[in-house]
Image: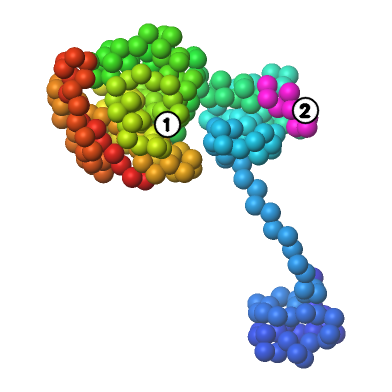
Amino acid sequence: MRPTTSSVPPLRSAMRASHAPRQFAITNETYGRFPGGSDAMHLMWVMQVHHLDTDFYDRFFRPGAYGATHPAHLGTWHPQRTGSLLTMGQEPPSRSIRRVDWSDLATVQKIADAHVAAYLAAGRNKNMDHQDPQPIVDRVAPAVLALNNAHAVELSWLDAASLAALIRQAFYARRIGDVGAFLIALDQTAKYESPNYLWFQQRYSRFVYIDRVLVAPSIRGGGYARRLYRDLFDHARWANHQVVVCEVNIDPPNPASDAFHASMEFREVGRAAIHQGSKTVRYLSREI
């Protein structure tokens, strides 16, 4: 509405507000608009967060730390990231969202599970540059096992049962793609008989130990190991850890790993010969 001849003329400066009728509270430039105003109000601001790392809250907070819609957010509002997912009544999320009862936790959980499954299935090492590290779930465990055992000299051989046990007690077990790269780490509470892990457990009261990390040869050089390490550092900081540790082979040598860990600011804290002297390792540590 534009002012009439009987209206208060537009004011160009807060300095002139005192000449306006008392029913207007003019406190700043009006930029030629009708000087509409109101009495001062106190507003409660709310920050609404959608993209939560629910794994973090599940691990470190009690149930109820986030709302029922959070685990379903990705598929509901970003279906392009979950493939051609269909939900309620076999309709896309954008068409079915109004018919979803978000107070029904059982329904929400089913939708969330479907979204996660579709997202993982759509990954399959496509567009890995844009994928965040994801949990190692049962569906990809055989691929992790195969990739691990193809590099058993560097990592040590596993069977399916030992991999499952390792993941169950892992502080961090994530991969990029399906599966292009993965990292498994333990904290000081693990029940693990690795001589390297035990070396750190005897010397540190709290730590995060990188048990194994591997990037498939076909995609090396893309920064995936660095991305996994940085994600691990973030998780460790959230859990109030101050040090991340690992070992690197001296014999047989692994110069690429030496260079990588030096670039990530790890420093040597010890050495040992293990497995009846068949392997010699350097123990490394990085403060976070």
In front of the other: label 1 or label 2?
1
Q: Tell me the residue at 78%/32% (across/down).
A: 103
Of 254 and 85, the residue lying toward us: 254
- Per the model, the C-alpha gap separating discs 1 and 2 is 36 Å
Q: Is residue 144 left or right of residue 279?
A: right
Identify which amino acid the numbered label 2 is placed on: Asp
Q: Are marks 1 and 2 in contact (CB under 8 Å)?
A: no
What secondary structure is marked by label 2? Answer: loop
- Measured as percent of width and height from the top left, residue 119 is found at 53, 24
Dot 1, crowdedness within 10 Å: few (<14), some or many (≥20)?
many
Residues drawn in magenta: 99-110
Q: Is residue 178 left or right of residue 85?
A: left
- Measured as percent of width and height from the top left, residue 217 is found at 26, 21
What secondary structure is marked by label 1? Answer: strand
Of 269 and 46, the residue lying toward us: 269
Residue 82 lies in quadrant: top right
Q: Tell me the residue at 50%/22% (across/down).
A: 120
Q: Tag count in the figure?
A: 2
- Measured as percent of width and height from the top left, residue 96 is found at 72, 28
- Measured as percent of width and height from the top left, residue 133 is found at 44, 31
Dot 2, crowdedness within 10 Å: few (<14), some or many (≥20)?
few
Q: Which quadrant does the C terminus fall into?
A: top left
Relative to 278, residue 247 above or below: below
Residue 229 lies in quadrant: top left
Residue 123 visible here:
no
Is residue 280 magenta-colored?
no
Which residue is label 1 attached to? 187
Relative to 150, residue 1 above or below: below
Residue 288 visible here:
yes
* Image mark for residue 8: none
Which residue is label 2 attached to? 104
